[in-house]
Image (tube, rainbow, N blue to C red):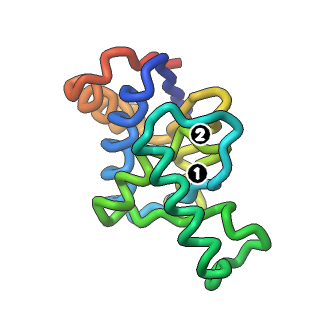
Amino acid sequence: MTSYTSSRESDLEILLSFVGRHLGEAGAIATVDLYADQGMASGEARCLFEELKRKILSSGGKGRKREDPLMGVVLDLSSEEGIRQFCLLGFRTIGCEAFVGNDLVLASVENERTIWLDFPESVVSELESSARGSGASGLMRR
């Protein structure tokens, strides 16, 4: 498993935009927990976070299988809006995961600002190269 971190939030957003597209093409199921231990510096991310929470809570959590409707919220990575949600919230909430079939291929934890990827090395290298080419120069691979 490969992990990435950065001192710049924009680097992680860029990386997740490429990862989200890759996951969408692979038919992955991505979920995010709509809780955050820390405030969100990005106004766009904070607004999106609050908007999604309001939407889910106003629906009464209908269609949700979990007791807490704000945990494990599914993001549609086949849409641009789902990818936007993924790249803005994926590393800013208490948890984000993606599965291809039964295989966990992405995990993120807010407090560590770390994104773990479980893809073949060739895919990881391609995603990293694309992210760096789009300005994510501060990514640190572990």
* Horizontal and vertical percent position of residue 94: 67, 43
Of residues 52 and 82, the one drawn nearer to the viewer in this rendering:
52
Residue linked to disc 2? 108
* Horizontal and vertical percent position of residue 142: 53, 18
Q: Few, some or many C-alpha atoms within 10 Å of disc 2 (few <14, some 14-19, many ≥20)?
A: many
**Residue at the location (68% across, 61% down)?**
71
**Residue type marked 1:** Glu
- Cα distance between the residues tagged 1 and 2: 7 Å
Horizontal side of residue 52 vs 35, given as left or right: left
Horizontal side of residue 72 vs 48, given as left or right: right
Please say if 72 is above or below 8: below
On residue 22, the disc is: none
Please say if 61 is above or below 118: below
* Horizontal and vertical percent position of residue 125: 33, 29
* Horizontal and vertical percent position of residue 81: 33, 61
The secondary structure type at the circle numbered 1 is strand
Horizontal side of residue 93 vs 46, given as left or right: right
Residue linked to disc 1? 97
Of residues 44 and 15, the one drawn nearer to the viewer in this rendering:
44
**Residue at the location (29% across, 30% down)?**
131
Please say if 35 is above or below 111: below
The secondary structure type at the circle numbered 2 is strand
Q: Are marks 1 and 2 in contact (CB under 8 Å)?
A: yes
Q: Few, some or many C-alpha atoms within 10 Å of disc 1 (few <14, some 14-19, many ≥20)?
A: many
**Residue at the location (34% across, 38% down)?**
123
Q: Earlier in the sequence, mark 1 or mark 2?
A: 1
Residue 99 in view in this figure: no
Please say if 23 is above or below 59: above
**Residue type marked 2:** Ser
**Residue at the location (52% across, 62% down)?**
52
